[in-house]
């Protein structure tokens, strides 16, 4: 599937620059955070009411603030200071920001990976078949792609959410279920419709790239040879066309994960993601208290930026090593 | 083939794409949950009234008939009425176009002004501190969601460093939004056109300053992603281009560096970039939706989000349709520009 | 007249690559006289193109000129620089490796210009050929309008922006446009007025090479460097292009440094020749010295490799073996040709000095055979270098 030349290119570019290493480390950290969130979290991320005795939410270190309280009938200024109990403070309704940060990584990574997988499953077969057979299927795909491209991805996603709704699917959390993490939420909310929607707005890029590859591969000698032996078309597609077009598809997939994470965050920010355990949603709640409790919006934003950077760094690495010119690899949310 | 013929063919293709967009939108409306008549009248409406509206609007007709009616209305330029406000969608779209256009154009200008020189410097001084700086900036720029960037700009510049920025009253439902009301004076900022007219007729910079004050942060927010993207594209394209033999030849004939970099190399770099930028116009509109929400900017994006949250389909369709038409139009212009920039591409 | 115009001494150009340091040009000596055609001949990979690029100051990273001097005779330039850079000036000569980049750049186009091997990739595909020639004319016009040669042509970002708005501020002027058309006519392009506005892809290869000659002549340079000017062309077109170069050289009396692997071209065009091997000039002298009185076995090998048309079924006798890799680590300190040399002797394991070649006064060769005849008793045993290499390989493991 992946040739030795590609592997050695990957190794070479990896050794040359610091950036792919940084990307790999970052992504590993974020994936570990996402997977083992129930073990790493200090508090149940959905539990509210962790407030300072003086009334306000806990600030993270460096963000101490003063607030006014009525004490013995008098109005006084009191200091609200950080606590070790809540590493990154708590939010406006008293939830632990650090624990929510970990769970937010889950939703981002889950939607990113599941969305890309779904988009791959939709786009690649369609593109390969269109490129391989050509003719009407191909014309149809290209026209459909033109129509899809005329919609801004985010706008189309919003319109689709209008149709699908945004109910999350709740799946039992295996770590909690196995009894390793007590007091954590028992189910993981998977934003199912969001996943479908992001796949629906990104699959067309996979289709276009797969089509382009199939188009050039079908004229290769080995494909013609296979045809002359009477190999059925579906077999040629699976054994020749797919393996030989996989490299650019991998590059595109990596970069589309970053795009999807950004779309998910935007949808959540606009209130269309259906789960409150999402970084985008958290930023939305923090925006109302931006002046007085800036950390509530800051922390989840850093999470988004770091995960998108890590994926982009890997994407750049793959692209530099594999193929410099892939259509759609420079496209954002 | 002549330019006129080329434009005609591309316009025909564009019409086809728009028809596709319309059909997708109609399909979405048809399968979306919720009865249009109920949405139009509100929850408290009586069954009789709902039935009456369904009949009037043709909602009881077979779906094919509804689709035909819908297309027929669109062809005559009738976008219908908003379900909620009962105003003409056309007017509701048109009144919001200038604000969005101003924002998008300002963002594009910022992006081009910064990104192209940055990409050129980055590519011509590879490995220098300015190259690393530009690479880091562009990596951050394409990785930062613009709603968060907008908030952080407000926080850092406005709240922490006290750089004055216009804001809505603190009692408003969107306390961080900027909107168009200038708080200290309570004056309402006007659009660029009106501000420019004031400048001409009254020789007063007041309106212009106010306009600039309001548009800067949203435009920077919207423009950052594009600045980063174009920097990356320019850098990598320029590096490819600089390796070509003709560059050595222009150096050999003693051409000044500015001309080599900008007249020769950058021009050839921009040829493929322009196509990418055309396709990115959709992303720009998507970004505008978010940016307008963050900054309470009275443009199409903000209206679209409102329409979506109350499922006001005609208004939503009108806005999306406008965006799609813009996209198709811009890409026709881009293709025409391409044939002008690259003499090797004749119009097939 | 016989006045030296270019004196290259001990020039070394190295490339610092991932595999290691490549000594593309190594201690190269060369003098070129005003008005002559000097040929550098060698196999591909011998460093002749890098020599040309070093003289033009067009060596690009990871390459770098690490040693030596390139002295260029130009009285005005020497006067101009005497105060600011006394170390670079020696009489009428200026050492180009000791002057600032700015000065080096200012000489391109006006003092030195270059013709490249592949005309199709050496023109910008998206500008008209005429425009590109006009640019070269304009460089010359502006440089000659400037009394101080070392200043070069200044063109700022502001001028560029202004030229987009005002057509009167464009870099290319009406005068240079007209001169470009004259130049196109001079190199024998039919319909020059119409051809001016055509793009490179509308030209044939031969036409484009003529256009490139026109472009190189536009600056009225002292030295024209022609790097394989005919290699990419059809045989019939090659002759035409050489004719043009020949005629123009006679008319203008300019100096040409001709880089080629084709001894036929050398014989036809050059007054003096340097034979290049592994980054060095191993033998140089007049055409007669090199063709008839050569001492270096490599020169003999090269000459032997010209198919002799008079001999029925003329056999091609190539020099056996390959050009060495030029990797510093693998080069050692011997005669680099020894491993391919049919007359290698024990003393060849030490680098030979530059010796008089026995022909004219200019004739020099880096070979012990110039000092004494071949002695069979001193010959290296057969397969000496293969064994040496085999040992290295086992060492590596």
Image (cartoon, rainbow, N blue to C red):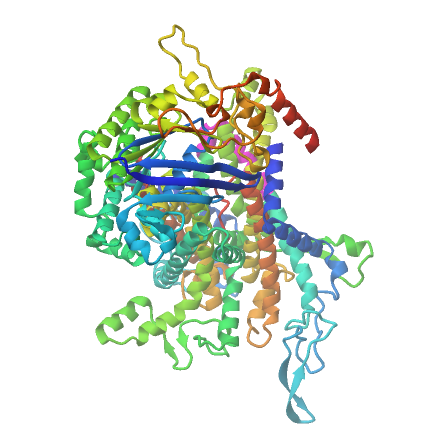
Residue at 46 percent across and 46 percent down: it is: B236
Of residue B67 and residue A71, the one placed in the foreground of this image is: A71
Which quadrant would residue B219 be assigned to in this image? Answer: bottom left
Q: How many callouts does the rendering have?
A: 0
Viewer-closest of A328 and C322: C322
Residue at 32 percent of width and 55 percent of height? C82
Q: Is residue C341 visible?
A: yes
Q: Residue furthest top?
A: C312
Residue most extreme to the bottom = A73
Image location of residue B95, percent across then percent down: 35, 63
Magenta highlight on residue A138: yes
Q: Is residue C126 above or below residue A100?
A: above
* C198 sits left or right of B280 in the view: left
Q: Where's the C terminus of chain B, which quadrant?
A: top left
Is residue B99 left or right of C336 when viewed as pictured?
left
Residue at image position (58%, 65%) is: A283
Task: List x then y, in percent, for residue B229.
Answer: 46, 53
Quick one: which residue is furthest to the front in this view?
Answer: C372
The one nearer the camera, B235 or C215, is C215
Residue at image position (59%, 68%) is A297
* Residue C221 pos. (x, y %): 27, 41
Q: Is residue C227 above or below residue B264?
A: above
Residue B10 included in the magenta stretch of the image: no
Tell me if I can see residue B16 in this picture. Answer: no
Q: Is residue B140 above or below residue A128?
A: below
**Viewer-nearest residue: B312 or B192:** B192
User: What x and y, as percent, mark residue B208?
Assistant: 32, 72
Residue A325 relative to residue A65: left or right: left
Quadrant containing the N terminus of chain B is: top left
| Magenta span of residues | A118-139
Main SS of the magenta part reads helix
């Amino acid at each position: 599937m992946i040739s030795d030349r590609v592997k050695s290119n990957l190794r070479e570019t990896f050794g040359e620059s610091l950036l792919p290493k940084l990307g790999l480390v970052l992504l590993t950290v974020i994936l570990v955070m996402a997977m083992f969130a129930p073990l790493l979290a200090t508090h149940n991320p959905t539990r509210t009411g962790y407030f300072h005795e003086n009334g306000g939410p806990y600030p993270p270190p460096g963000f101490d603030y003063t607030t006014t309280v009525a004490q013995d009938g008098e109005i006084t200024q009191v200091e609200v200071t950080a606590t070790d109990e809540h590493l990154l403070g708590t939010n406006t309704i008293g939830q632990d920001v650090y624990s929510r940060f970990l769970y937010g990584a889950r939703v981002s990574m889950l939607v990113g990976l599941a969305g890309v997988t779904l988009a791959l499953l939709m786009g690649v077969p369609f593109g390969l078949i269109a490129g391989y057979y050509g003719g009407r299927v191909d014309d149809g795909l290209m026209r459909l792609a033109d129509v899809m491209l005329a919609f801004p991805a985010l706008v189309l996603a919003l319109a689709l959410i209008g149709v699908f709704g945004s109910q999350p699917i709740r799946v039992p959390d295996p770590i909690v279920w196995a009894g390793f993490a007590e007091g954590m939420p028992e189910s993981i909310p998977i934003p199912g419709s969001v996943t479908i929607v992001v796949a629906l707005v990104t699959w067309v890029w996979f289709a276009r790239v797969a089509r382009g590859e199939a188009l050039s591969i079908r004229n290769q000698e080995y494909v013609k040879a296979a045809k002359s032996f009477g190999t059925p078309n579906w077999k040629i597609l699976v054994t020749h066309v797919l393996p030989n077009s996989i490299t650019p598809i991998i590059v595109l997939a990596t970069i589309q994960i970053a795009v999807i994470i950004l779309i998910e965050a935007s949808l959540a920010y606009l209130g269309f993601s259906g789960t409150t355990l999402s970084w985008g949603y958290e930023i939305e709640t923090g925006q109302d208290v931006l002046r007085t409790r800036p950390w509530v919006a800051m922390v989840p934003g850093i999470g988004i930026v770091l995960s998108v950077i890590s994926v982009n760094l890997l994407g750049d690495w793959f692209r530099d090593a594999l193929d410099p010119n892939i259509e759609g690899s420079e496209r954002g949310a | 083939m002549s330019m006129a013929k080329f434009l005609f063919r591309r316009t025909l293709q564009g019409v086809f794409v728009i028809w596709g967009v319309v059909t997708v939108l109609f399909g979405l409306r048809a399968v979306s949950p919720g009865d249009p008549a109920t949405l139009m009248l509100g929850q408290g409406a009586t069954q009789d009234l709902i039935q009456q509206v369904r009949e009037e609007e043709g909602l009881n007709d077979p779906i094919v008939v509804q689709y035909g009616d819908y297309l027929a209305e669109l062809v005559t330029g009738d976008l219908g009425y908003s379900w909620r406000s009962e105003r003409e969608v056309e007017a509701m779209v048109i009144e919001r176009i200038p604000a969005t256009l101003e924002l998008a154009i300002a963002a594009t200008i910022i992006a081009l002004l910064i990104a192209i020189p940055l990409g050129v410097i980055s590519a011509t001084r590879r490995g220098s501190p300015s190259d690393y700086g530009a690479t880091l900036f562009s990596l951050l720029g394409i990785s930062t969601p613009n709603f968060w960037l907008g908030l952080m700009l407000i926080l850092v510049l406005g709240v922490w460093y006290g750089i004055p920025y216009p804001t809505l009253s603190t009692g408003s439902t969107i306390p961080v939004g900027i909107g168009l009301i200038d708080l200290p004076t309570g004056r309402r900022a006007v659009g660029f056109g009106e501000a420019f007219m004031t400048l001409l007729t009254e020789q007063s910079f007041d309106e212009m300053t106010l306009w600039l004050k309001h548009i800067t942060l949203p435009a920077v927010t919207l423009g950052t992603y594009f600045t980063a993207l174009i920097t990356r594209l320019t850098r990598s394209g320029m590096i490819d281009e600089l390796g070509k033999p003709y560059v050595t030849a222009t150096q050999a004939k003693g051409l000044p560096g500015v001309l080599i970099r900008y007249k020769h190399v950058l021009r050839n770099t921009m040829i493929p970039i322009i196509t990418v930028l055309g396709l990115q116009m959709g992303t720009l509109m998507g970004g505008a939706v978010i940016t307008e929400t963050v900054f309470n900017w009275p443009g199409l994006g903000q209206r679209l989000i409102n329409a979506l949250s109350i499922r006001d389909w005609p208004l939503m369709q009108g806005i999306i349709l406008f965006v799609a038409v813009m996209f198709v139009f811009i890409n026709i212009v881009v293709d025409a520009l391409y044939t002008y920039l690259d003499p090797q591409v004749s119009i097939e | 007249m016989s006045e030296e115009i270019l004196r290259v001494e001990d020039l070394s150009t190295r490339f610092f690559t991932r595999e290691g340091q490549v000594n593309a040009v190594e201690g190269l000596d060369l003098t070129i006289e005003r008005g002559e055609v000097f040929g550098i001949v060698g196999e591909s990979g011998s460093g002749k193109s890098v020599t040309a690029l070093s003289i033009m100051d067009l060596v690009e990273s990871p390459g770098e000129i690490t040693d030596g001097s390139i002295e260029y005779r130009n009285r005005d330039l020497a006067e101009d620089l005497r105060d600011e850079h006394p170390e670079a000036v020696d009489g009428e000569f200026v050492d180009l490796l000791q002057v600032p980049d700015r000065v080096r750049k200012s000489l391109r186009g006006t003092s030195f210009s270059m013709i490249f091997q592949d005309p199709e990739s050496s023109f910008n595909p998206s500008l008209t050929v005429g425009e590109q020639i006009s640019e070269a004319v304009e460089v010359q016009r502006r440089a000659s309008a400037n009394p101080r040669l070392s200043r070069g042509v200044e063109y700022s970002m502001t001028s560029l922006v202004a030229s987009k708005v005002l057509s009167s501020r464009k870099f290319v002027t009406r005068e240079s446009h007209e001169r470009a058309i004259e130049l196109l006519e001079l190199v024998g392009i039919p319909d020059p007025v119409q051809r001016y506005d055509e793009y490179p892809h509308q030209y044939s290869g031969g036409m484009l090479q003529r256009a490139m000659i026109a472009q190189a002549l536009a600056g009225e340079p002292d030295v024209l460097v022609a790097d394989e000017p005919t290699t990419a062309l059809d045989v019939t077109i090659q002759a035409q292009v050489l004719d043009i170069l020949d005629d123009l050289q006679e008319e203008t009396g300019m100096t040409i440094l001709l880089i080629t692997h084709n001894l036929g071209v050398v014989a036809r065009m050059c007054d003096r020749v340097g034979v290049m091997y592994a980054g060095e000039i191993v033998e140089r002298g007049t055409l007669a010295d090199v063709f008839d009185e050569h001492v270096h076995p490599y020169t003999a090998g090269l000459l032997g490799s010209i198919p002799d048309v008079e001999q029925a079924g003329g056999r091609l006798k190539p020099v056996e073996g390959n050009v060495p890799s030029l990797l510093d680590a693998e080069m050692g300190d011997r005669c680099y040709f020894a491993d391919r040399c049919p007359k290698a002797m024990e003393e060849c394991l030490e680098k030979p000095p530059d010796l008089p070649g026995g022909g004219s006064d200019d004739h020099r060769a880096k070979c012990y055979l110039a000092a004494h005849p071949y002695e069979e008793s001193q010959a290296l045993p057969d397969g000496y270098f293969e064994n040496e290499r085999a040992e290295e390989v086992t060492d590596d493991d």
